[in-house]
Amino acid sequence: MNKDWIKVFAAAFFEVLWVIGLKHADSFWTWGGTIIAIVISFYGMIMAGKKLPVGTVYAVFVGLGTAGTVLSEVLFFGEPFKLAKILLILLLLAGVIGLKLVTKDQAQEGAES
């Protein structure tokens, strides 16, 4: 895994933070943290998109962010556990992993030509 994919995963982590922040922020500091998480999240995604295919970066970013947000709500905020929801999240993650596995970055393509 190269550093550009690490940027995508880090950006998705910050996406989870800001999405949760949008729902739960109630003070100046929590709103400030939410805004910082938004900036870091989008910056990481944009930087990764310069070296990796943008469509794949966005799909992985959104998929991981969605899965992370749903799992965080279940684990930390009392959202009811539903087997169907977890199975669908696992299916989403399988698609994200599949996209990552079949996508070559531009550095690899240049080395192979």
Image (cartoon, rainbow, N blue to C red):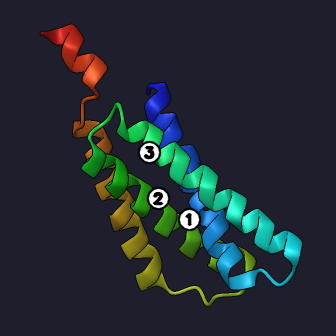
Q: Residue furthest bottom?
A: 80
Do callouts 1 and 2 mark residues in contact (Cβ within 8 Å)? yes
Percent x, y of residue 54:
29, 46
Percent x, y of residue 83:
47, 83
Identified at 70% across, 74% down, the residue is 21
Q: CA distance from mark 3 to mark 2?
A: 16 Å
Mark 2 closeness class: few <14, some 14–19, many ≥20 residues within 10 Å: many
Placement of 46 over or under 106, stated as above or below? below
Which of 31 and 4 lies nearest the eye of the viewer?
31
Q: Which residue is mark 2?
A: 64
Q: CA distance from mark 1 to mark 3?
A: 20 Å
Q: Which residue is mark 1?
A: 68
The quadrant the C terminus occupies is top left
As helix, strand or loop, the secondary structure at mark 3 comes to: helix
Q: Amino acid at mark 3?
A: Ile
Q: Earlier in the sequence, mark 1 or mark 3?
A: 3
Identified at 57% across, 53% down, the residue is 41
Q: Is residue 98 visible?
A: no
Q: Which residue is mark 3?
A: 46
Left or right of 17 in this view: 64: left
